[in-house]
Image: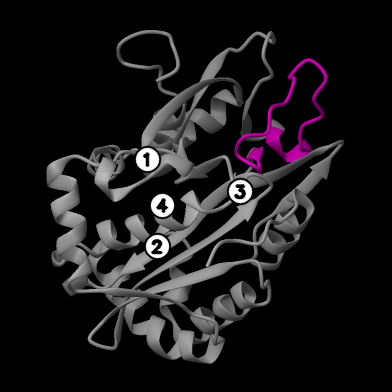
Amino acid sequence: MTWERMSIEEYAAFKRNDGDRVVKIKDTWWVEARPFFFRPLFPLSRVNPRVANYPAQSLVGGVLHLVPEQVPANSNMNLFLYQDIAGYALEGMDKKSRWVVRKSMESFRAERLTDVELFIEQAYPVYRSFYERTKYFYKSERTAERFFAQWARTIYSNPKVKVTGAYRQERLSAVDISYQVEDLIIEDVFFSDSLSQQLKVTDFMLHVLREQASRSDARMLFRGFPSGKESLDRAKMMRGCRMMTLPAHCRINPLALYLGKTLMNGSYRKLAAMIAAPEQDGKEN
């Protein structure tokens, strides 16, 4: 159940089909993460700001990207990464974490979901439960079954995307969607119903993901950027995921920054969390 590697070109085509605005300039694919705000599609891409050609629309909003070694940085970029993925083993976790995972394994089993129609039928109620619990605003149109089905078919149109389900008593309880781009495994989507949260389905699915990653040829596992919500970010770190702080370049239109802070506070908090300096020192976190 390991991944078939995607190229960055394939990844860009997949994200475009999924509705993201992506554009290639020179050798870098950019994604419009928020209106008029761009970052490299591949999160570990390094761009030299001295020679970069940015998307024209970024003049209205801004850009954020990692910089190569020896190139001056004016900011940071924080990413959640598991690095030594080949060394993962349940026995290597602390006593409490081992107990939580083993307890969750009594309730759930993992299965790769390969049938799109079965996925739509079983996963849609799980997604609705997830949305009602979290009020997750991103792509909220997927709470309508028609749009959920459309999204599902986009996912399944790429055979290199892996969809894994957690079942409890033959009922789907959680879904994890991931893929490998070059030597990086990207956990793209995770959602679960409310009951399964009480039974530690997040810990179960993370164990499955990390165990599978340990058998892959990938170098690292990417679990996203900081959300700006301390409880969510802290939960990732409590499960052993390291928040790395890497040198970056950030350029933001001052008016866009002001409007984001006053009118789009959630997006502003996420940006602030993504570029925050380490709390203790100036080294990588």
Residue type, label 3: Asp
Q: Of 277 and 57, which appears nearest the observer?
A: 277
Quadrant of image for the C terminus: top left
Of marks 2 and 4, the one in the foreground: 4
State whether residue 53 is above or below residue 75: below
Residue 29 lies left or right of residue 239; in this view the side is right
Q: Amino acid at mark 2?
A: Phe
Give the extent of the magenta segment. Answer: 39-58
Direction front: furthest residue: 91
Q: x, y percentage for residue 262?
A: 39, 36
Whole-angstrom CA distance, mark 2 to mark 3, is: 22 Å
Give me the residue at 68% from left, 33% from top: 45
Q: Which mark is residue 210?
A: 4
Q: Earlier in the sequence, mark 1 or mark 4?
A: 4
Question: Mark 2–mark 4 contact, CB under 8 Å?
Answer: no
| x then y, percent, for residue 200 | 19, 62
Q: Position of residue 109 (x, y in %)?
A: 30, 75
Which sits in the foreground, 22 or 47? 47
CB under 8 Å between discs 2 and 3: no
Mark 4, secondary structure of its residue: helix
Identity of the amino acid at label 4?
Arg
Residue bearing mark 2? 190
Sequence-earlier tag: 2 or 3:
2
Asked if residue 143 is among those painted magenta in the image, a careful observer would answer no
